[in-house]
Image: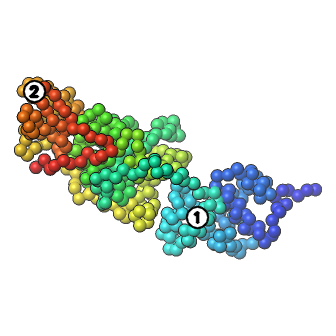
């Protein structure tokens, strides 16, 4: 009577343990499991049994004939290999260097980065990255390139997906560019101005006010039709003394760091079972801020680098005053009245005061807080808005507020 396939393993007895370790390492990655079992000459049932043992008990689950320690194919102790793979399973998007740093933090010492790479490659757990061609562009270098915490916050909505209940999940994310610290990753009911403001105002109260905020050109952060791209939301930021930065339309690489963070969120939250709840998003954010080291930060975690802004939030000012200028209020429809004549400026500025000062015969400059909006021609009852290019910062032109 033929023996079961599991007992007819073609391996030498002295190599059985190493072969088992090699098998489970490869089985942890993306592969054709049955083809892998056939390659090692075992039944799929046996392969699943070993994989389950490894997931539950680590390398101890592979030991059958003897309880004494065995070396791994990489010259590492078995518990070290098990721990390396456990960390990778927890952080699927992390590379060898980040995993090595986390291992060091938890155990004091860590195997070399090359050992991490070899173990992960053997397990098929290394994702090959596409090399970007030079013509694809890169990071947008703006006048507000962050060199310290709170110089630039970046904000965007993560691309939506359906959660387990079939509901649309599209978290709002806010991040400090310099420290990589995620200030918010929050599910919202919608992307309306007031909804986003109610989510961001607590951030100003907790962390203070940044020098600038970078966003794309979509609502509610910007309006492609409005003067200087101002929306009702970004107008509030400007009134608070915050400068605006925007990327080019259709160029997410202009906010590359934020987009890379979104890719991590996609792998670690969007694709995880039950990972769409607010509680899971909060856990992920805390882990990203407090456990995930970054090479650009000297392998520190964002929470070790970020600090609150020295500019405290005191609410949105109710009125704006302009030194040495006339002041006029923009009406509800976005109109400015000049000698009884309504002239359209911007609906995003409805209710706000703007400053006017003469700039030539029959012409007036119009300012909103620190921004020069354009020029007014009373004779023709026309407003000529300041041209702007979305790939440049909407920066302070001069200090106009007292």
**Tag 1 residue:** 117
Position of residue 75 in the picture relative to residue 190 (left or right): right
- Evaluate whether residue 390 shows in this view: yes
Position of residue 373 in the picture relative to residue 135 (left or right): left
Quarter where residue 78 is shown: bottom right
Q: Nearer the viewer, residue 79 or 367?
A: 367
Where residue 248 sits in the image (x, y, percent)? 36, 42
Where residue 32 sits in the image (x, y, percent)? 70, 50
Q: Earlier in the sequence, mark 2 or mark 1?
A: 1
Q: Nearer the viewer, residue 186 or 145?
A: 145
Q: Indicate which label's residue lies in the foreground, 2 or 1.
A: 2
Few, some or many residues within 10 Å of mark 2 (<14, 14–19, 20+) = few
Position of residue 331 in the picture relative to residue 158 (left or right): left
Position of residue 201 in the picture relative to residue 47 (left or right): left
Q: Which color mode does the image show?
A: rainbow
Residue, x 54% and y 53% (percent of image)? 129
Where 333 sits versus 388, above or below?
above
Residue, x 31% and y 38% (percent of image)? 222
Where 46 sits versus 201, above or below?
below
**Tag 2 residue:** 379
Few, some or many residues within 10 Å of mark 1 (<14, 14–19, 20+) = some
Q: Residue farthest to the right? A: 1
Residue, x 51% and y 65% (percent of image)? 97
The number of discs equals 2
Mark 2 and mark 1: span between their CA atoms? 72 Å
- Evaluate whether residue 184 shows in this view: no
Where residue 112 sits in the image (x, y, percent)? 55, 71
Instruction: Check disc 2 and report its element: helix, strand or loop.
Output: loop
């Amino acid at each position: 009577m033929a023996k079961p396939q599991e007992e007819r393993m073609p391996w030498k007895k002295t190599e059985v343990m190493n072969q088992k370790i090699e098998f489970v390492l490869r089985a942890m990655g993306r592969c054709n499991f049955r083809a892998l079992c056939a390659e090692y000459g075992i039944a799929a049932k046996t392969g699943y049994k070993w994989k389950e043992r490894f997931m539950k008990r680590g390398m101890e689950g592979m030991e059958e004939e003897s309880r004494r320690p065995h070396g791994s194919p990489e010259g590492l102790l078995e518990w070290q290999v098990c721990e390396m793979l456990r960390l990778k399973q927890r952080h699927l998007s992390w590379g060898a260097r980040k995993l090595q740093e986390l291992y060091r933090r938890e155990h004091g010492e860590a195997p070399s980065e090359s050992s991490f790479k070899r173990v992960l490659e053997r397990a098929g757990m290394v994702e090959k990255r596409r090399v970007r061609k030079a013509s694809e562009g890169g990071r947008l270098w703006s006048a507000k390139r962050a060199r310290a915490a709170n110089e630039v916050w970046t904000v965007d909505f993560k691309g939506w997906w359906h959660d387990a209940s079939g509901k649309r999940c599209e978290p709002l994310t806010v991040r400090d560019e310099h420290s990589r610290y995620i200030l918010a990753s929050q599910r919202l009911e919608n992307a309306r101005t007031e909804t986003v403001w109610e989510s961001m105002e607590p951030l100003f109260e907790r962390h203070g006010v940044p020098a600038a905020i970078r966003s794309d050109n979509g609502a509610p952060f910007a309006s492609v039709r409005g003067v200087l791209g101002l929306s009702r939301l970004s107008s509030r930021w400007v009134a608070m003394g915050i400068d605006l930065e925007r990327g080019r339309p259709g160029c997410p690489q202009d906010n590359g760091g934020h987009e890379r963070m979104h890719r991590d969120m996609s792998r670690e939250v969007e694709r995880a079972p039950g990972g769409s709840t607010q509680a899971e998003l909060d856990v992920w954010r805390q882990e990203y801020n407090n456990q995930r080291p970054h090479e650009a930060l000297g392998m520190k975690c964002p929470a070790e680098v970020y600090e609150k802004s020295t500019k405290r939030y005191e609410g949105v000012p109710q009125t704006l005053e302009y030194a040495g200028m006339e002041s006029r209020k923009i009406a509800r429809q976005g109109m400015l009245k000049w000698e009884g004549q309504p002239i359209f400026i911007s609906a995003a500025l409805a209710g706000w005061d703007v400053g006017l000062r003469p700039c030539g015969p029959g012409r007036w400059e119009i300012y909103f807080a620190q921004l020069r909006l354009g020029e007014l021609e009373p004779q023709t009852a026309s407003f000529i808005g300041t041209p702007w290019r979305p790939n440049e910062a909407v920066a302070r032109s001069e200090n106009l507020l007292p």
